[in-house]
Structures are given as structure tokens and as C-alpha cells.
Image (spheres, rainbow, N blue to C red):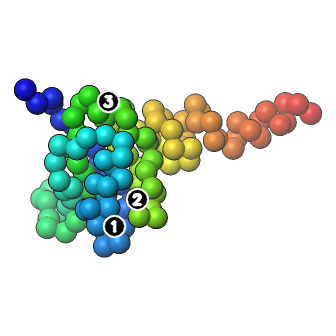
Amino acid sequence: MQAASVKVVFKDLPLHSVTNEEVLEVVKEYCKVSSEVKYANLWFEGKMTSVRNGDCFIYIPVTEVSKLPAVLEISGSCSRVFKPPNLTICKRCSNQGHHPTDPKCPARTTDVIIEMLETF
């Protein structure tokens, strides 16, 4: 029996600069893959269009998905990897589990400034 697969989304890749083969080559360095590369389309007025939005996705076995890092470099472009169970990845520090505005973000400059002011 084949293990269940989950959808893993790769964001921020240039549409026409990165090939499906390049995406698969990098992903296969970390884990097994259950599908070909597929692309998400734009929605307009509640309907899906035929225009790709730049996000691609692959189905990966549940047992393998934890092996993927939060950010991958694919053909010279950095891609944020959105995978279950935690699909939130911070754009500021690239860690999972919070947004850039979250006080828990280790890269928040305001926390650094407050700590510096408290030392004076």
C-alpha cells in the first residue's frame, strides 16, 4: 500500500526561468516525490482562470515531507516551501510558524532596538 501524499507548494519562483525538471531535481535531493510539478492558476471574480500565478506544487508522501527545508534554492531563485502541518513561513527570517510582524520573529528589528535601549 502506498503512503498518503500531501501537497507542498513552492512560492516565489519565476514562471519562465525555472523548469519542472529543475524543481524535481532539487526536491528529490531531500525526499521522494509522488507527482509531477503542477501549477496554480489565478482566480478572478470567484472563478479560476487559465493564467498561472507562479506558484507550483508537488505531492510528496507524508512520511517524506518533514525532510524538506522551509526555503530552497532552485535554479538561482529562492523559493519558500509551504508544507503541512505548518504552512506559515516568515519572509523576514525564513523560519516556520510565524509571520514577519509576529513578536516571536527572531529578526524583528524593534526587539533588537528595545534591547539596545534597555542596556543604556
Helix or strand or loop: what does disc 3 sit on? loop
Residue 77 on image: x %, y %: 44, 62
Q: Nearer the viewer, residue 42 or 86?
A: 86
Q: Would you place residue 8 above or below residue 20 in this image?
A: above
Q: What mark, if any, has residue 85 been given in the picture? A: 3
The span from disc 3 to disc 2 (Cα, nearest Å) is 23 Å
First in sequence: mark 2 or mark 1? 1
> Label 1 to label 3, Cα distance in Å?
27 Å
Q: Residues within 10 Å of mark 1 (few under 14, many from 20)?
A: some
Quadrant hosting residue 14: bottom left
- Judge left or right: residue 108 versus residue 22: right
Q: Which residue is mark 2?
A: 74
Viewer-proximal residue among 81 and 65: 65
Residues at discs 2 and 1 in contact (Cβ within 8 Å): yes
Q: Residue at x 45, y 32 (%)?
A: 97
Q: Residue 71 appears at what percent x and percent y?
A: 45, 47
- Residue assigned mark 1: 18
Amino acid type assigned to the residue bearing label 2 in the image: Ile
